[in-house]
Image (spheres, helix red, strand yellow):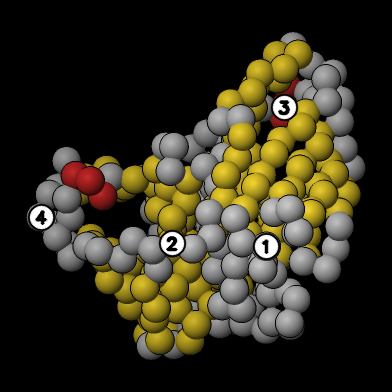
Amino acid sequence: KQEVTQIPAALSVPEGENLVLNCSFTDSAIYNLQWFRQDPGKGLTSLLLIQSSQREQTSGRLNASLDKSSGRSTLYIAASQPGDSATYLCAVYPDSWGKLQFGAGTQVVVTP
Amino acid sequence: DVKVTQSSRYLVKRTGEKVFLECVQDMDHENMFWYRQDPGLGLRLIYFSYDVKMKEKGDIPEGYSVSREKKERFSLILESASTNQTSMYLCASSLVFATSTSVQPQHFGDGTRLSIL
């Protein structure tokens, strides 16, 4: 059974530093990988979607890489801002049904 | 833009009650999903449906059932609510089309925070 792990569980950085969030998965046979952001008490906001044939995706200050063979993805957030404070969730699509398997998330605090 | 609407943001019910959580999507998506989210555990799949009247169990179906009478609506039912079902519930939908290397992304509602007293 696919397992998704996010380390660390929590992270605190000063404003302006680059953020590096890690995600690993046990079965490399995935379809897509998706990064989400969740603010306290709110739903999920999709940040980046990487198809299994892709190595990375970029959107503004965000860049996500995917290495299927090693079962890893990394989300980079450049020049962090206090507004980046949130929980970041990594999820994989393990089969053609389109279901998602989530990691437990990394809680990020960016201090002014 | 895809819109997935969950009928309640907050809900308080009592143990033993039958509870209905409703989800509606407006993009003619075939797939619909129910997840629950608990601190430290992330989101876990309860049930999903790939067509009207079709359903499949997810990872944690015990204590729940679902109903999909119309394509746009997917209901999660707690037959007899218990305190351990206090949680955040999220609904999602997606198109069913898939290739050999990619599936369609899911779109999420804002969630229902359910408290069972």
Q: Are marks 2 and 3 in contact (CB under 8 Å)?
A: no
Q: Are marks 4 and 2 on the same chain?
A: yes
Measuring 89% from the left and 42% from the top, which residue is drawn there?
Answer: A60
Q: Please state which of the two labelled residues, at mark 3 or mark 1, is closer to the viewer.
A: 1
Q: CA distance from mark 3 to mark 1?
A: 33 Å
- Three-letter amino acid code at the position of disc 4: Gly
Give the residue type that dot 3 points to: Gly
Spot occupied by residue A92 in the image (x, y as percentages of width and height): 63, 59
The answer to whether tags 3 and 1 share a subunit is yes
- Mark toward the start of the polypeptide (3 vs 1): 1
SS class, disc 4 = loop
Judging from the image, what secondary structure is the residue with disc 1 in? loop
The disc placed on residue B16 is: 4
The label number, if any, that marks residue B82 in the structure image: none
Q: Quadrant of residue A20?
A: top right
Q: Chain of mark 2?
A: B
Q: Secondary structure at mark 2?
A: strand
Q: Does mark 4 fall on the same chain as mark 1? A: no
Distance of mark 1 from mark 4, alpha carbons?
42 Å
